[in-house]
Amino acid sequence: MIPSTGGFLAQDFEIEEQPGLTYRMDLEGGSVRGHVDGREAVRQAVFRILQTERYQHIIYPWWYGIETLDLYGEPVNWVCAELERRVTEALLVDSRITSVTDFEHDTSVKGVLHTGFIVHTIYGDIPAEREVDI
């Protein structure tokens, strides 16, 4: 006797977005305590994504993080444009993030590109930044 699943797929399903509840990271104290949700959870997700080098840690899936190691030694103008693309690509994986805009690059420190930008989320705008060695 073979079980029948014909009526199962015909059912009407309602898809709900799961809450973004996560552990609170205390960066100054170096600890993890309590929980956060909403805007603060997205802010922490942005921080974690931008601090994780893609393809370098087996614990993370291939789509998580940002690639920056290969930018070292490349022309500054190209790195600026490429970093904008990579930051946007890395952050838009999170469904709570709608866009990334207003990139500003600072090359005043030799060998370092400091980039600031605004992350637009469903909870409001979050300023963020990333530094890479060039």
Image: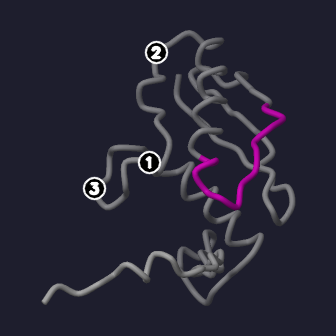
- Marks 1/2: CA–CA distance: 25 Å
Q: Nearer the viewer, residue 117 or 72?
A: 117
Does 32 sit above or below residue 79?
below
The residue under label 3 is 58
Q: Nearer the viewer, mark 1 or mark 3?
A: 1
Residue 73 visible to the viewer: yes
Q: Position of residue 126 (x, y in %)?
A: 81, 56
**Identity of the residue drawn at 54% across and 53% down:** 49
Residue numbers of the magenta segment:
91-103
Does 100 sit above or below residue 52?
above
Q: How many marks?
A: 3
Q: Tag 3: residue type?
A: Ile
Q: Tag 1: residue type?
A: Trp
Tell me, for residue 63, which label it has, or none. 1
**Neighbours of disc 1 within 10 Å: few (<14), some (14-19), many (20+):** few
Specify the color scheme: one colour
> Is 55 included in the stretch rendered in magenta?
no
**Identity of the residue drawn at 48% across and 48% down:** 65
